[in-house]
Amino acid sequence: MGRRWRRFGLWTLGVLGFGYFALGPILYGLVIGFDWTAYPGGSAIEALFRGLGYTGQNAIAGVFWLVLGLLLAMGVAFTAARRGVRANADPERRRVLTGVASGALAAVGAGLAATAAATARSLYGWGRSDTGWRPVNAGIQADVEKTHPSYPEHWKGARVKAYRTLGRTGWKVSDVVMGAGRIKGDKGSDLVRAALDRGVSY
């Protein structure tokens, strides 16, 4: 019994480690929206999905590796559990269904464990030097003042006063820049034009 529990503990640690170290970074990268080529074999994966009729704008090479990794963990768990049941069963009472059921249960458990470990690293930042996406998203979604309630006179006609050279490019970047991740629609276009008119160059 002790040997069986040790084996179970090592297997659990292995699945958690696979989820944390292999699937965690992939899940973290999915939120960023990397290009196809940011993942191993990205160009080949893109060609495969385009050939299958995928026309979306999102690069899903990361999704491919994430799903493949989960299926791999579940497949290995299924095979190991089924073999374990068959090896310990009385040869005269060996039941195929028992092995299949145990394998299916182990596969589901491995999938959940790997997903939990990946989620802990990517969404909650466990073990990372920075933080995960959940607290970052909470800051992005925070209810803050989006438009100043008044328009002071000294703001009108204000312009960028300083520029700095970007690396060795020779390009001058304004010391006030504009984030555009959530700007859209006619008002967004007007806002960008106003920033450009005021000297914002980035």
Image (cartoon, rainbow, N blue to C red):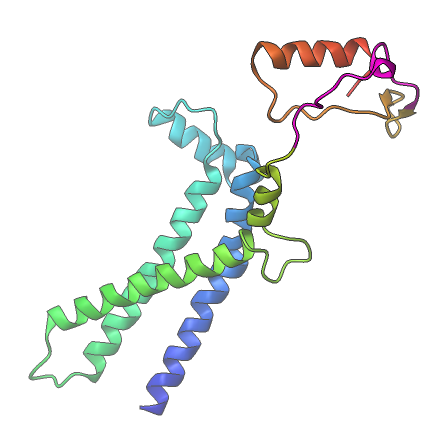
Q: Position of residue 118 (x, y in %)?
A: 49, 56
Residue 66 in the image: x percent, y percent? 44, 48
Outermost residue to the bottom: 2
Count of marks placed on residues: 0
Q: Is residue 202 above or below residue 120?
A: above
Q: Which residue is located at x 45 percent, y 31 percent?
A: 46
Residue 63 sits above or below residue 100 on the image: above
Q: Where's the N terminus, which quadrant?
A: bottom left
In this picture, residue 105 sits left or right of residue 196: left
Query: 100 left or right of 191?
Result: left
**Occupied quadrant, residue 194:** top right
Q: Nearer the viewer, residue 79 or 164?
A: 164
Residue 179, magenta (yes or no):
no
Q: Position of residue 135 (x, y in %)?
A: 59, 49
Left or right placement of residue 11 versus residue 194 in this view: left
Q: 114 or 130, which lies in front?
A: 130
Q: Residue at x 85, y 9 (%)?
A: 157
Magenta residues, start to end: 145-163
The answer to whether one can see residue 40 in this image is no
**Magenta stretch, overall SS:** loop
Q: Residue at x 45, y 69 (%)?
A: 14
Magenta stretch holds residue 162: yes
Residue drawn where x is 29% and y is 67% of the image: 106
Q: Work out which residue is located at the far left of the displayed protein and give it.
A: 92
Residue 180 placement (x, y as % from top left):
66, 23
Q: Nearer the viewer, residue 94 or 201?
A: 201
